[in-house]
Image (tube, rainbow, N blue to C red):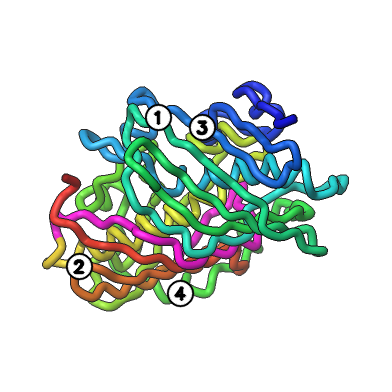
Amino acid sequence: MPKLYSYNQLVQALELTSPILMIDEALVADDCLSGKASKLMSINEPVFMGHFPGHPITPGVLQLAAMAQLSNLIFRLTVPVIAGTTIMLRHVHRLKFRKPVMPGMRLMVESKLLERRANHEADFQVTCTTEAGLASSGTITLARVSPTLQEAIPMDERKPSPWAEKWSSDEQFTAIDLMKYLPHRPPFLLIDHAVGICNQDTDVCGYKNITGNDFFLAGDASGCYPSELLIETGAQLGCAHVLAQPENIGHLGIFLCIDEAHFYEQARPGDQLVIHGNCAPTGRAGVASGDFWIDDRKIAECSLKFVILPSIE
């Protein structure tokens, strides 16, 4: 028989809770190869205070989180458990965002196992729909991995990212400065500091300090920064860079599709995430890519498509 998971059972099974647990209940098919889940979107959710004030829209990466969580549940039931391992989002492929998800809607999530591989990875076809139709769809890969055992490294012994020297003398922008260009606000402003925002070239650099007090870390028992949010962090950096250009001031950047995203390691409290981004707008649309670094280690990379709109409406 299909297995029904209540919210409390999902908390126990996935070791996640508010604010990052993005499904309220789930139903896994009796063959454990597919599943459905639902999430009721409420205006009371704190994320809507920051995305966006006065115009609440569910962030695309939280739709991705819902997809990954349902797939994680299926993964746990179909891929053998290995002691001392954890499950992480490894890859996102052609995840398209088609319709906005607003407060008051019911988000319906579906996941279907496509392939299991001998390296303890599995691919899933995933979708999110609402009363308005298909909201997002794509393919994701989960993997069972050994957690990286990172011993504390003294601050004066850490090796900087390859971009540290390049950006050390450029114009600096604080989070307050960035809010002049971005509609994002806490708790969904995910950039703490940036460099080169107003430059005319396509490169930009940003920083996100990962702390145990971070809003989203509170919901993950592993203490890791959710991998889905790395994509949003990079998207906000690229958005600020594009919207700081004179011809785009006062406009809005929306990302339409995650073409590819690869995750190699997770960020933890005490890590300073360094993002090197490259944005190439061509008229109203464009392509952006980003590399994510902790010290001298690249932990993720992604590419996405975006569009520039006159306003949130």
Task: Identify which residue is drawn at 61% across, 56% down.
Answer: 155
Distance of mark 1 from mark 3, alpha carbons?
10 Å
- Above or below — where is 227 with respect to 243? above
- Residue 59 location, x and y as percent? 38, 44
Q: Which residue is mark 2?
A: 284
Distance of mark 2 from mark 4, alpha carbons?
32 Å
> Label 3: how many residues lie within 10 Å, few (<14), some (14-19) or many (20+)?
many
Q: Are marks 2 and 4 in contact (CB under 8 Å)?
A: no
Q: Which residue is mark 4?
A: 165
Q: Secondary structure at mark 3?
A: strand
- Residue 30 location, x and y as percent? 74, 36
Tell me the magenta residue range.
Answer: 249-275
Query: In the picture, which quadrant includes the N terminus?
Result: top right
> As shown in the figure, which amino acid type bears the numbered disc 2?
Arg
Q: Nearer the viewer, mark 1 or mark 4?
A: 1
Among all residues in the image, which is located at the extreme front?
A: 1
Q: Which of the two labelled residues, at mark 2 and mark 4, occupies the earlier sequence position? A: 4
Picture quadrant of residue 250? bottom left
Q: Which mark is residue 38?
A: 3
> Label 1: how many residues lie within 10 Å, few (<14), some (14-19) or many (20+)?
many
Q: Which residue is mark 1?
A: 41
Q: Which mark is residue 94?
A: none
> As shown in the figure, which amino acid type bears the numbered disc 3?
Ser
- Residue 269 location, x and y as percent? 60, 44
Q: Secondary structure at mark 1?
A: loop
Task: Identify which residue is drawn at 78% across, 58% down.
Answer: 120
Q: Which of the two labelled residues, at mark 2 and mark 1, occupies the earlier sequence position? A: 1
